[in-house]
């Protein structure tokens, strides 16, 4: 692999042992993928800060880098962490678990990352531009950055993400190169009766991920009214059922002005025509019980936007959460603070809604909560709830989720 003088210095340890270790890992990654060069990236988003996912090994890795004096070389945001940093006690999180999570958080902060604690980093802050080379982890954010914004990232994950941030470099491979971003299969949505709801796009994303697997799908026939929140739900779902890091929607996403541009002039390997029946069947697979008897409704995967919480507030007018039921909302600190200033947060809290900042329902300690069945309007949550929490999941639109737990 060709390295510049600066990269060579880092690899030889002339900038310290921390950057050296990170560069060793990046070079090894490049060798594995046959990259000839490294390229600079302008920013990183780190997923390795999620203790529930990385466990002791992830904690030791971050501790080692921190002790070796590693610092991020580029602006770096942090994904959701394993509990609400300020309010974990009142959420009943196991103190020993919270302590481990806090140690991991501190190592990443010591290395210079920003305490953004969100899996929707594209809502605000370090939002990249079209064509920008970046190193993002967190599957929904990777798909959003590549597809909706048109920035360029590979599927970085725990451990490699922080190494990209410390070195400011990634191997030049995969989705960093234009020629690897061409669509591979065509999914025709022209015959679907799509509704302007996040749930409808979550189900479509889930179905598209099952079809695409690890290919780059091009979707045609998506209505022009599709919103950022619809696309967010689609991204989270397609990356849950499939190993998709990039999709194109003709006339909607920036690299797909038309079908020819999306496929870069090539022919699709396969063509699929979706029907309303296929969409309904995909929706059915997202619930593993057929009951409306749920203990809790959980909203905000990926972290709820201001618009989504305002919609929740509208649907909660004249309603409150029933006794012995829960309505939980997961969001970022930024969205929470805007809606606190507006009064929406207090309004919803008075009705029994509980807010969780920084964290994630399927990546935490549920401590003393004794749930069995949880409803959600997120395909990603529905996909992961049974495996990660042992609970049953019911997928429903926001209005139905509310009806199951409020009166
Ligand atoms: Fe975020 Fe957790 Fe969903 S990290 S994308 S809320 S599974």
Image: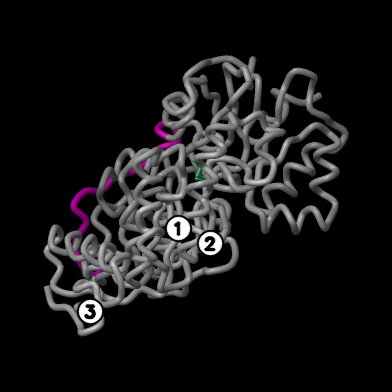
Q: Which residue is mark 3?
A: 9
In-image side of 336 versus 99 (left or right): right
**Residue shown at 21% from the left, 64% from the top:** 24
Q: 103 and 370: which one is in front?
A: 103
Q: Which residues are magenta?
A: 263-278
Q: Which residue is mark 1?
A: 144
Q: Secondary structure at mark 3?
A: helix
Alpha carbon distance from label 3 to label 2: 33 Å
Which comes sooner in the sequence, label 3 or label 1? 3
Q: Is mark 3 within 8 Å of ligand 1?
A: no
Alpha carbon distance from label 3 to label 1: 34 Å
Q: Residues within 10 Å of mark 1 (few under 14, many from 20)?
A: many
| Residue at the far bottom in the pictured view | 5
The reply to whether callout 2 and callout 1 are in contact (CB within 8 Å) is: yes
Q: Secondary structure at mark 1?
A: helix
The reply to whether callout 3 and callout 1 are in contact (CB within 8 Å) is: no
Which comes sooner in the sequence, label 3 or label 2? 3
Which comes sooner in the sequence, label 2 or label 1? 2
Q: Residues within 10 Å of mark 2 (few under 14, many from 20)?
A: some
Q: 227 and 102: which one is in front?
A: 102
Q: Secondary structure at mark 2?
A: helix
Q: Position of residue 190 (x, y in %)?
A: 42, 50
Q: Which residue is mark 2?
A: 122
Q: Position of residue 374 (x, y in %)?
A: 59, 24
Identify the image quadrant of the C terminus: top right
Is residue 231 visible in the rendered image? The answer is no
Alpha carbon distance from label 2 to label 1: 8 Å
Report if residue 272 lies within the magenta region.
yes
Report if residue 260 lies within the magenta region.
no
């Amino acid at each position: 692999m060709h390295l510049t003088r600066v990269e060579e210095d880092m690899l030889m340890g002339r900038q310290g042992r921390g950057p050296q270790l990170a560069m060793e890992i990046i070079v090894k990654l490049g060798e594995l993928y046959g990259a000839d060069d490294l390229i600079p990236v302008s920013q990183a988003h780190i997923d390795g800060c999620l203790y529930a996912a990385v466990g002791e090994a992830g904690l030791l890795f971050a501790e080692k880098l921190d002790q070796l004096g590693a610092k991020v070389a580029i602006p770096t945001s942090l994904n959701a962490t394993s509990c609400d940093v300020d309010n974990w006690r009142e959420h009943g999180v196991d103190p020993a678990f919270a302590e481990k999570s806090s140690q991991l958080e501190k190592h990443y902060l010591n290395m210079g990352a920003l305490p953004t604690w969100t899996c929707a980093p594209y809502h605000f802050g370090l939002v990249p531009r079209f064509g920008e080379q970046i190193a993002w982890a967190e599957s929904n954010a990777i798909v959003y950055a590549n597809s909706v914004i048109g920035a360029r990232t590979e599927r970085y994950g725990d451990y490699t993400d922080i190494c990209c941030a410390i070195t400011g470099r990634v191997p030049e491979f995969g989705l960093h190169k234009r020629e690897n971003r061409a669509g591979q299969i065509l999914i025709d949505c022209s015959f679907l009766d799509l509704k302007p709801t996040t749930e409808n796009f979550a189900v479509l994303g889930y179905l598209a991920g099952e079809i695409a697997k690890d290919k780059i799908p091009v979707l045609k026939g998506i209505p022009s009214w599709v919103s950022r929140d619809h696309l967010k739900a689609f991204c989270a779902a397609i990356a849950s059922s499939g190993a998709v890091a990039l999709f194109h929607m003709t006339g909607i996403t920036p690299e797909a002005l038309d079908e020819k541009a999306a496929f870069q002039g090539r022919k699709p390997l396969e063509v699929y025509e979706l029907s309303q029946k296929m969409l309904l069947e995909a929706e059915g697979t997202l619930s593993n019980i057929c009951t409306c008897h749920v203990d809790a409704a959980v909203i905000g995967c990926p972290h709820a936007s201001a618009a989504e919480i305002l919609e929740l507030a509208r649907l909660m007018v004249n309603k409150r959460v029933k006794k012995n039921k829960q309505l939980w909302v997961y969001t970022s600190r930024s969205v929470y603070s805007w809606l606190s200033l507006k009064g929406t947060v207090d309004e919803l809290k008075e009705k029994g809604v509980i807010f969780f900042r920084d964290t994630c329902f399927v990546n935490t300690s549920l401590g003393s909560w004794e749930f069995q069945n949880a409803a959600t309007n997120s395909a990603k949550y529905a996909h992961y709830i049974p495996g990660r929490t042992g609970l049953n999941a019911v997928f429903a639109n926001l209005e139905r989720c509310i009806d199951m737990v409020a009166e």
